Amino acid sequence: MRSNTAAVENQNINFASLSVENRKSDPFTVVDGRYVGHDGFVVPQDFDEFHERFPEYVRRWVERHVDRSTPNEDVEDWTHDLLIHLRHLPANSKHREAGKQDIVETFDPVKHHGANAARFFNYINLCLGNKLSTMRSGRLKNPLCRPGNLSLTAAWEDADRDQADDEFCHRHSEHLRRRCQRQERQRDARQAVAEFSEFVKREDSSVLPAIEAIAATATPSAAAEVLGTTTAGFCRMRSRLRQLGRCFQTGARVPRRRRPYKRRLTTRIIFRVR
């Protein structure tokens, strides 16, 4: 088994010209291409060396970050998945371009402000924590893995425990109920828009394109550009739509559309006195 320390003459790394975001960096040295922290800790070169020197590290980390009631099978599965995560970089990882194959090889003492044991294991813990969070999120999305699940047949008689019809599922599923309500509101909204479009087409078809422009854009200027008019012209069409909307809801008579306002020209008469 390799030792964690190395006592040789090495060249110190100068951090004077490196940006560390106002963090105090620990000095480290390089021995035969291996990083050695100021505490004498030798950073493993790859995952194989890391697993050889610390074979129980990942398992103990998992045991500290899961509930005590977690079955041993789950602990073993998560430990195995995390070891695979540390052993193999993703196929599209940018570190593969530099010839690196696993997570341990990606440790950079410059970015992590040192190469002592605390800096190195903090990096490993971050990688393990991110991966464990991802695995937990994926498990929560799987309905079969949620611990709070109840059997659909829990409240049924013994004669009908193997049956569950649509009515039972809809009555006991809040998710399905909300989804059905949302779909019903969307269906009613589409029907109301279709009826209003027919009303506008019948009463004043000149402003019908404004409905599509409003649905396709977010600002009056963009809608005016789609309609090929000015912003003021679009605002007049929108005001007319609002007027038609009030008549559509109340059943009132649709008033005649006002003509565009034209500024009157004033003629100034000048009298000259001779």
Image (spheres, rainbow, N blue to C red):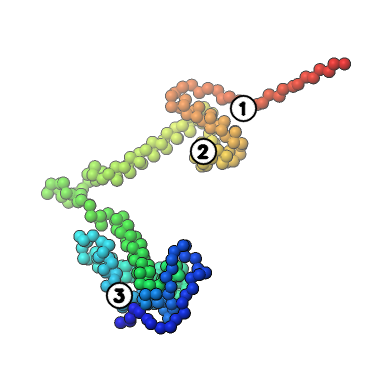
* Residue at the disc numbered 2: 214
Which structural element holds mark 2? helix
Whether residue 25 is situated above or below residue 252 in the rendered picture:
below
Q: Do the residues labelled 3 and 2 touch (CB within 8 Å)?
A: no
* Disc 3 from disc 2: Cα separation: 63 Å
Front residue of 266/30: it is: 30
Q: What residue type is labelled 2?
A: Ile
Q: Is tag 3's residue or tag 1's residue first in the polypeptide sequence?
A: 3
* Residue at the disc numbered 1: 260
Q: Is tag 3's residue or tag 2's residue first in the polypeptide sequence?
A: 3
Mark 3: give few (<14), some (14-19) or many (20+) Cα within 10 Å: few
- For the N terminus, the image quarter is bottom left
Q: Which dot marks residue 170?
A: none
* Disc 3 from disc 1: Cα separation: 82 Å
Residue 224, given in percent of the width and then of the height, sits at 58, 38
Q: Is tag 2's residue or tag 1's residue first in the polypeptide sequence?
A: 2
Residue 9, given in percent of the width and then of the height, sits at 43, 83
Query: Looking at the image, which residue is at 33% across and 40% down?
Result: 181
- For the C terminus, the image quarter is top right
Mark 1: give few (<14), some (14-19) or many (20+) Cα within 10 Å: few
Query: Looking at the image, which residue is at 47% across and 65% down?
Result: 20
73 left or right, relative to 269:
left
Which structural element holds mark 1? loop
Front residue of 136/112: it is: 112
* Disc 2 from disc 1: Cα separation: 21 Å
Whether residue 148 is situated above or below residue 226 in the rendered picture:
below
* Residue at the disc numbered 3: 54
152 left or right, relative to 135:
left
Front residue of 47/177: it is: 47
Residue 74, given in percent of the width and then of the height, sits at 24, 64
